[in-house]
């Protein structure tokens, strides 16, 4: 007999664990979440927060999204992305990033009701964790996962209370390992991984200093510093990252992974800060310093029986593209509704198989993208002649040569411009953030084909209602004139059926199924004199179905199935689809 029992035990209160606990608690599932430490994130590691993540927060509640926005540095302060010799030194180039160029901004505005922003992990985690606790999650700090055993009926997990040193057991129906890049849960499961850990060495130096005079006129979250040695290890280049505008900063500087990790004491931290800022007199208020390694590794399967892994436990990669905590939170959004449906008896455990089928390809994609982004700094070093070692004089000559009035210098200038522009695959990669599409047993395509890509799918989001894709966002209006995103009309742990005039048989079918499956299905009817109106015709252009067709949208706002028009037997079709998705 275990000491404690719960429906779902989550290991870890990072972005993945806290989001999952918050979602499960919101869906009315008994959940316990534990963290081996007494604190939440004590360094501001993740910060770039993309629109899809903000949509998850919005689905948790308007107050959750609002609190995040209150603490975040807004998008307009994010995007100058400067490349320089040092903050005080010569600027070598810059590129508009994170949706701040006019074209990209328009794409962001059209794609989502939410705004990309910069929210350090030290703010994001408490928001998610508080949401979990305030909605009834049992949270235990200073509590360490030790081991687990699963059987047909559930999972028995042994934990250690680090205050008393005593161990105790938790019996749960399901266990989620959101325990970060050194995941013990993943290790105990023996899940398959591809790639390599420890491919580069990095140090983080967190400090306070007012650097407004170097940056306020070119606001950005990232200032890339090109100095000899900047291409050694780490994330490809020296980095001065804004944590709070403009007086809290994180420096990231690489070290050779084949050498022992350096001891970063106050003297070394100050010296590195002075060197990258370019101010030999700079005084910093050092908050912390530590070393970490760049990983290139992902799980090819994220589940064994009743146990799942998510977040960095499953995908381990450098911070390039800012995908880590975003993807971790999105893993939770994918799994939480499925666990809730199974725990509530609305679906069979077969539904849970779709978690790994859907998310493991995303893990592969983002780990590959993040590591490729490091390699793509190479052409910038080449263009400046910095790729051949650390001979300062040679580098200075080569950098100076780009200012000459010669054909070679013009070619060098062009090469540098192109190399910087190409970094949009790291700093403005909207498609990677928004185009996640699923193929699994929890999606029914009925043989339909995805739309042909109309642009580079890494750079640009392509809205579609093709089953498996996220429901496109457009603004719609209720009868009082209030505006709602299509996404606001879905989610909150429920399936949604969207139809239009002539789609009444779908509504009747959904209502019958809702009763028989004990599964709440929200109905949204869009059209003139309907509860929701499409005054501008944006929905009609986005929906890819006729008025009397329908979309079945999953609780995570991905399209589960669509019928382009009314079918001969809507009841039979919707029954077939929902039974397939729920694993009946
Ligand atoms: C410098 C830097 C910058 C970054 N920038 C970005 C960015 O801009 N955007 C982005 O999305 N990501 C970024 N990341 C990555 C991001 O920090 C991680 O991807 C994210 O923290 C992963 O979340 P997680 O919840 O999976 O794991 P973690 O945040 O690592 O959380 C793991 C949790 O598990 C707990 N735990 C571990 N072992 C046990 C155990 N045995 N028992 C109990 N609890 C345990 C830990 O205490 C912690 O609570 C950055 C990372 C770094 C280093």
Image: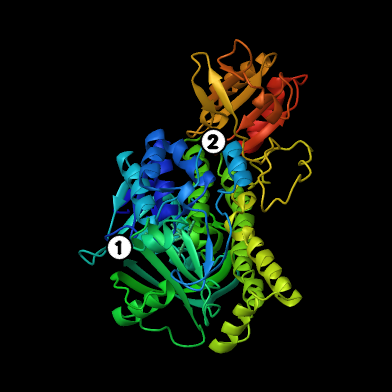
* Residue 152 picture location, percent across and down: 50, 52
* Residue 11 picture location, percent across and down: 39, 57
In the rendered image, which residue does mark 1 sit on? Answer: 37
Of callouts 2 and 1, the N-terminal one = 1
The numbered disc on residue 93 is: none
Q: Is mark 1 within 8 Å of ligand 1?
A: yes
Residue 453, placed above or below residue 373: above
Q: Residue furthest left?
A: 164
Mark 1, Cα crowd under 10 Å, few <14 / some 14-19 / many 20+, is: some
Estimate the spatial distance between the alpha carbons at disc 2 and disc 1, rounded to whole Å: 32 Å
* Residue 303 picture location, percent across and down: 55, 56
- Quadrant of the displayed image that contains ligand 1: bottom left
**Secondary structure under the numbered disc 2 in the rendered image:** loop
Out of 324 and 563, give the one closest to the viewer: 324
In the rendered image, which residue does mark 2 sit on? Answer: 555
**Which residue occupies 61% across, 21% down?**
510
| Res 494 seen here | yes
**Which residue occupies 67% across, 39% down?**
463
* Residue 94 falls in image quadrant: bottom right
**Secondary structure under the numbered disc 1 in the rendered image:** loop
Residue 543, placed above or below residue 212: above
Residue 584, placed above or below residue 426: above
**Which residue occupies 66% across, 75% down?**
383
Report the number of numbered marks. Answer: 2
**Which residue occupies 54% across, 39% down?**
556
Out of 467 and 44, give the one closest to the viewer: 44
| Res 306 seen here | no
User: Would residue 323 appear left or right of 148 to someone viewing this image?
Assistant: right
* Residue 14 falls in image quadrant: bottom left
Mark 2, Cα crowd under 10 Å, few <14 / some 14-19 / many 20+, is: many
Residue 565, placed above or below residue 158: above
Quick one: quadrant of the C terminus? top right
């Amino acid at each position: 007999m275990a000491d404690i029992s719960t429906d779902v035990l989550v290991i870890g209160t990072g972005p993945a664990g806290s989001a999952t606990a918050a979602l499960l608690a919101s869906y009315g599932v008994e959940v316990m979440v534990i963290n081996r430490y007494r604190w939440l994130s004590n360094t501001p590691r993740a910060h770039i927060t993309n629109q899809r993540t903000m949509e998850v927060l919005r689905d948790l509640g308007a107050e959750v999204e609002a609190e995040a926005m209150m603490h975040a540095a807004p998008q307009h302060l994010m995007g100058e992305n400067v490349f320089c010799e040092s903050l005080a030194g010569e600027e070598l180039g810059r590129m508009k990033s994170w949706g701040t160029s006019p074209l990209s901004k328009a794409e962001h505005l059209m794609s989502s009701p939410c705004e990309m922003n910069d929210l350090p992990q030290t703010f994001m985690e408490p928001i998610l964790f508080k949401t979990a606790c305030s909605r009834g999650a049992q949270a235990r700090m200073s509590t360490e996962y030790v081991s687990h055993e699963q059987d047909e009926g559930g999972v028995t997990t042994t934990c250690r209370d680090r205050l008393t040193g005593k161990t105790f057991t938790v019996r749960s129906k399901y266990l989620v390992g959101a325990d970060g890049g050194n995941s013990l849960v993943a290790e105990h499961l023996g899940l398959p991984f591809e790639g390599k850990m420890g491919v580069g060495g990095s140090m983080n130096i967190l400090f306070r200093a007012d650097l407004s005079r170097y940056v306020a006129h070119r606001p950005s979250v990232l200032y890339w510093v090109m100095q000899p040695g900047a291409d050694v290890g780490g994330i490809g280049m020296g980095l001065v990252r804004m944590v709070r505008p403009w007086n809290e900063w994180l420096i990231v500087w690489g070290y050779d992974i084949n050498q022992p990790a350096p001891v970063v004491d106050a003297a070394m931290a100050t010296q590195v800060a002075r060197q990258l800022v370019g101010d030999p007199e700079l005084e910093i208020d050092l908050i912390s310093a530590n070393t970490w390694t760049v990983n290139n590794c992902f799980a090819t399967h994220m589940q064994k029986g009743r146990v799942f892994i998510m977040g960095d436990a499953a995908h381990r990669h450098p911070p390039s593209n800012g995908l880590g905590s975003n993807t971790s939170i999105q893993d939770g959004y994918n799994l939480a509704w499925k666990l809730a449906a199974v725990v509530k008896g609305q679906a069979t455990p077969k539904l849970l198989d779709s978690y790994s089928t859907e998310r493991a390809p995303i893990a592969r994609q983002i780990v590959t993208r993040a590591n490729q982004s490091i390699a793509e700094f190479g052409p910038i070093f080449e263009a400046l002649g910095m790729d051949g070692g650390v001979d300062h004089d040679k580098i200075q000559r080569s950098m100076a040569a780009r200012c000459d009035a010669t054909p070679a210098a013009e070619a060098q200038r062009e090469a540098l411009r192109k190399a910087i522009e190409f970094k949009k695959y790291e700093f403005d990669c909207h498609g990677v953030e928004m185009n996640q599409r699923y193929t699994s047993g929890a999606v029914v395509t009925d043989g339909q084909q995805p739309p042909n890509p109309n642009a580079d799918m890494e750079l640009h989001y392509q809205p579609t209602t093709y089953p498996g894709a996220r429901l496109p966002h457009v603004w719609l209006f209720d009868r009082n004139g209030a505006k709602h995103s299509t996404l606001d009309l879905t989610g909150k742990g429920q399936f949604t059926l969207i139809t239009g005039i002539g789609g009444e048989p779908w509504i009747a079918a959904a209502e019958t199924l809702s009763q028989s499956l004990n599964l709440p299905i929200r109905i949204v009817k869009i059209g003139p004199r309907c509860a929701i109106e499409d005054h501008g015709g944006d929905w009609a252009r986005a929906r890819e179905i006729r008025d009397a067709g329908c979309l079945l949208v999953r609780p995570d706002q991905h399209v589960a199935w669509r019928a382009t028009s009314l079918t001969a037997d809507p009841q039979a079709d919707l029954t077939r689809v929902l039974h397939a998705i729920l694993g009946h």
